Structures are given as C-alpha cells and as structure tokens.
Amino acid sequence: MLSYQYQVRDPLGRVHDGTIEAASPDAATQSLRRDGFHVLSLDESTAEAGLFPRRISRREILYMTSQLAVMVDTGITLSAALDGIAEQEENPSLKKLVLDLKSRVEGGDDFSSALAGHPKHFDRTYVTLIKASEQTGSLGEMLEKIASYSQKELEMRGKVRAALAYPAVMIVVALGVTIFLLTYILPKFQPLFERKNVQLPTPTVLAMTASDALMQYWYLWLLGAVALVVSVWFGRRTRQGQQLLDWVYIHAPVIGPTARKVILSRNIRTLGAMIAAGVSVLDALRLSAEVSANYYYETLWLRVLDAVTTGNRICESLRHTKLVPSTLVQMIGAGEESGRLDDVLKKVSTHYDKEVETSIKTVTSMIEPLMITVMGFVVGGIGLALLLPIFSLSRGG
C-alpha cells in the first residue's frame, strides 16, 4: 500500500486534511468518495516517495517480468500476480508502478494498455508483444520470451559498456598524468635550467611551451573543455548533431565494425521476436527501426518498410546497402523463400550475438596495447624532455 495526503470537503462544506493508504490514486479517491467526501486534492505522501524517488532499473523490470511469467503460467490471475509482486517489492517506485498496473487491469484495461501508460519503463516492443499475446491467449509464454529478449539486451549493453570502460579510464588516467607532469613536475625544473643557462633541446622547449600555456591560460582550457561537453550534449539534441554522432559511431576506426554488429543484432532480434509472436511484418519492421538508436540504421529499416509495403521482399530492399552484410541478406532471403523467416531470424540473432561478443573481445585486445602505447609515448616524451637538459648539465659539469 502507498500513502497519500488528501484534502476533502464533507457534506456540510467543511474542509479536512489527512492521510490515507491505498493501492493507487484511483483507489484512494474511490475510498474517500464512499465515505461521503468530495476530493479537493490528492498527492502521494512525501514521506513515502522521498525528495528523490528511487529509480526503476531495467534489471528490476526484467526480474518483475520473469516473476510475472512464472506466476501466470502456474494459473494465478494477472491481478493476483501483480498484487503478489507488489507486496514483496522493496523499491517504492516499482511498487507504485505495479500497483498502478493492477489498478488499471482491475478497472477493465487490457494489460497492454496498462503497460502503455508507462512508456518510460515499457517500450513499444514490450507493449506490442503483450498485445499480440492477448490476442492468442499466451500471456505467460510471451512474458517468458520478453524476459529472455530483455536479458539478452541487458547482456549486450553490459558487454559494450565493459568494452568502452577500459579505454575511457585509460584516457582519463593519461590526461591526469600529463596535466600533473606539465603543471607540477616540469615547472620545478625550469628555474634550474634558466640558472645554468642550458641550451634546451627541442622536446624540452615544446614541453615547456605546453606547460606555460596550460598554467597561464588554464581558464581557457577549462572553458574549452566545458564548451566541448556542452556542444556534444546539445548537439545530440539536434537532428544534425545526432546524425553526425551516429555516423562517427558506426564509421570510427576499430569500434565502427563492432558498433554496426551491435545495432544489427538488436534489429534482427527484435524483428525475429515480433514475427514469431504473430505481429505483422510491417509493424515488426517499424519497431526494428525504432530500436536501432542510430539515424542511419533507422532510416534503412524505414526504407525497407516502405519497400515491403509496395510488395517487395525484405532481402531485396537490403541488397543495395553497405550497412548490412551480404551474407545476412542471403540468410533473410532464404528464410522468406522457405516461409520460416522467424526461425531464420532467431538463428541469425544468436549468430550475431556470438559475433558481437567475439568482436568486442578483439576490439578490447586491440585497444589495450594501443592505449598503453599512447600513454607511454606521452609520459615518456615528457620524461625525455626533462632528462635531456639534465644529461647536458652532467656532461658540462
């Protein structure tokens, strides 16, 4: 149960304030009306929600879906299953979400319609699959498939983030060490070189120049870094900026091929899940475009959708693009000809998941020595710039 603060007017016109516990706002309102009150305002209690409500993670939604699948499969009604999940849920935000779903279902809404009321937590793929299962009466089975689909998505995201984490940490460390050497270590030797009137070699002159620029104009460097971050942040919210970032993502050296495989794996997995669930090919293609999270692949699948609408096959629409490997086009064509497209897409999706995993390992193994080499070159260069004048002083002494 959740706690709500209310303000009501009784039949005599007097206003009352108080707190009530209920499963949802609608349930709280109905309870107050049954007591003869006219509800003026109703808000969730701040003591329950807190100033910073706890967020609902994708993994929590996945776990809820898995629980729901098991409970529905064992014959428990959807309403009772949701109530059972809510009772044991420790996250107040997720508990509120589940109770709202229960309230909507008990109010006569389809489960898919109830889910559609929370697009932040249940995307169109989730809602469409549930809607398809409602038409065939296979809700439990579909929830299990959605849980499996979501699990693969989470695993893929985790692998990509893990692969990007190492170079990100290395870049931060390299920048930190470089700034420390240029702003703290190098300036301590500069007075010594000036007193001894040493003829500085070119590497030392360059390092000293960089050190002076960094120390004297630190505010400009800071403003430049902030401007870069802000530009990228705002650029992603413009169509042209997002297109540029999406192009860089799939064409960048080393990571570009892996990025394309990750996107294609997501596209194929979604397309296969949709067609296997009985969703129309047109709707499946539209949702595959939406989950791309990349302008160029989204545009590609929307073009395929337009072509299929006019009577062409999927493989024919994909044949003249460099974004999709020819082997994948051939496999989709074989699935269309045999009438087993959903089975083929499932196998292709599994194949691409393995390809992505192998590709990520390869990229990580390539990035690691590359980053170490770059870091060694930068730090070694600064160290050499310090040692060369010292060697000159030693020979001169």
Image (cartoon, rainbow, N blue to C red):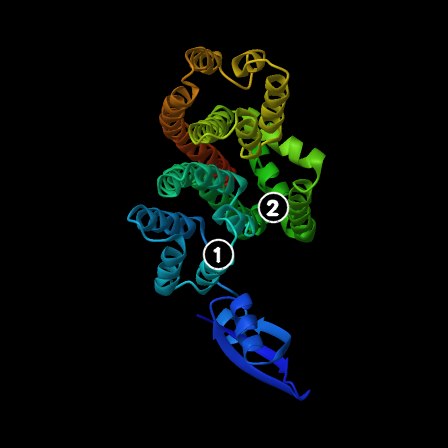
Residue 209 occupies quadrant:
top right
Question: Which of the two labelled residues, at mark 1 and mark 2, occupies the earlier sequence position?
Answer: 1
Is 322 or 350 nearer to us in this picture?
Answer: 350
As drawn, 156 above or below 5: above
For label 1, the SS is helix
User: Is residue 211 visible in this depiction of the protein?
Assistant: yes
Is 159 or 198 nearer to us in this picture?
Answer: 159
**Residue occupying the point 40% across, 49% down:** 59
Is 142 or 238 nearer to us in this picture?
Answer: 142
Q: Is residue 154 left or right of residue 8?
A: left
Is 11 or 232 nearer to us in this picture?
Answer: 11
Q: Circle 2 is placed at which residue position? A: 211
Residue 147: where, in percent of width, then height?
Answer: 38, 42
As drawn, 80 above or below 48: above
Farthest residue toward the left?
74
How would you rate the neighbour count of disc 2 (Cα within 10 Å): few for under 14, some for 14-19, many for 20 or more?
many
Residue 360: where, in percent of width, then height?
Answer: 40, 30
- The numbered mark at residue 189 is none
**Residue occupying the point 58% across, 14% down:** 317
Q: Alpha-carbon distance for marks 1 and 2? A: 60 Å
Residue 356 occupies quadrant:
top left
* The N terminus, quarter of image: bottom left
How would you rate the neighbour count of disc 1 (Cα within 10 Å): few for under 14, some for 14-19, many for 20 or more?
many
Residue 169: where, in percent of width, then height?
Answer: 45, 44
Question: What's the amino acid at mark 1?
Answer: Leu
- The numbered mark at residue 101 is 1
**Residue occupying the point 34% across, 63% down:** 88
Question: What's the amino acid at mark 2?
Answer: Ser
Q: Are marks 1 and 2 in contact (CB under 8 Å)?
A: no
As drawn, 56 above or below 370: below
